[in-house]
Amino acid sequence: MAAETRLLLPAALRRLPGTLARSVAIFVPVFFVATFVTFALRALSGLSPARIQLGEDATPQAIANIESQWGLDRPFLVQYWHWFTAVLHGDLGTSWVNGADISTLIGLGLGVSLSVAVFALVVGVVAGFALGTLAALRRGTWADRAVTGFVTTVSVLPAFVVGIVLVAVFAVGLGLFPSAGYAPVTDGVGPWLVHITLPALALSFDVMADVARQLRTGLVSAYEENYVIGAVVRGLSPRRVFFGHVLRNGIGPALATLGLKFPALVGASVVTEWIFGLQGFGRFANDSAQSGDVPAVQGVLVVSIALVVTFNLLVNVVLGRVTPASQRGV
């Protein structure tokens, strides 16, 4: 019975556990090494909570007492293991500046940044897929050239420039959106969407451009494959050829691009949040670095690493599930 059930499952679905296991085997060591490097930054920085709390005139004895309280007098590997095991339990430590729980501080801004980043990703992916598909289906025509010219233009525009233009036109000029601030989703979906639309649009242009370019390239290459030419010769409809053969085999580069774009969205949020007055993850990271709050910076880096690793893991799983070519290459 188990063998019969296995035969009934689609091939890609049967291979999914293997794909997931291989992806986890890659990303777990990456996370471990990245957290080790992150923790080592404190030792390399030479910063100390005593300098922040007591000032530059602190005596050596006072500095030693403070560092002993924070456990900084223990061997480096002991400090790292204590910190790493705490991270695995969701404890990112305590701020050197105000003694607050870093997990709580990051959580306050992470919801803001993730709202903007996920919305930007959705807008960029939807628009990029539409433009890339149009360019591929109309390859060599004016539509293809128009899409290529448009995505090339928007790809060189920095997010902060796009954000300033959006504020000037749609917030100040037309009054359609607020120019700054954030409304949590608990205040209603409408106010939440209104406040994150402009910053998300500012971040989505780069995603849209890369997805459109990669998708067009992948689809055009797929159209030139022998199996697609054979499907056309057999008399399959253009719709069936596109969705059954071309899209599944040409979508891989565009999906792989998303694994690179998500870290870019997280990084670009720093400038975007300043423009739109958002107290998000990027602003917290910048403020922590400016004040020398090393545990907070380490917490930001750990959360960023976890987000990037998780997102890339999901992209790998989707690639293995959706695209036959990538599945064969795993």
Image (cartoon, rainbow, N blue to C red):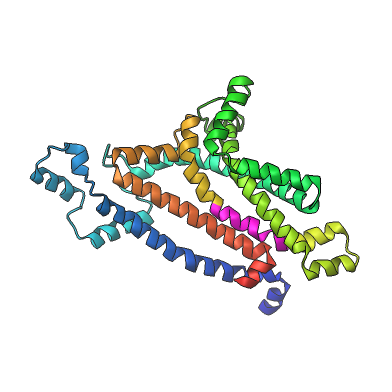
Q: State the image quarter where residue 10 is shown.
A: bottom right
Q: Residue at x 81, y 66 (%)?
A: 228
Q: Residue furthest right?
A: 235
Q: With respect to residue 190, does 263 lie above or below?
A: below
- Horizontal and vertical percent for residue 193? 60, 33
Is residue 272 rendered to the left or right of residue 61? right
Relative image position of residue 156 (x, y in whole percent): 58, 42
**Magenta span has 46?**
no
Main SS class of the magenta portion in the image = helix
- Describe residue 2's horizontal placement relative to residue 114 as left or right: right
Q: Is residue 123 visible?
A: no
Q: Identify the residue shown where x is 45% and y is 37%.
A: 280
Residue 116: x %, y % from top left: 54, 39
* Left-right relation of 168 to 71: right
Q: Nearer the viewer, residue 99 or 241?
A: 241
Q: How far across and down, in percent of the image, does residue 190 sit?
A: 62, 30
Q: Is residue 294 above or below residue 2?
A: above
Q: Which residues are magenta?
A: 248-260
Task: Tell me what residue is drawn at x 39 percent, y 41 percent.
Answer: 285
Q: Vertical placement of 20 versus 99: above or below? A: below
Q: Is residue 36 visible?
A: yes
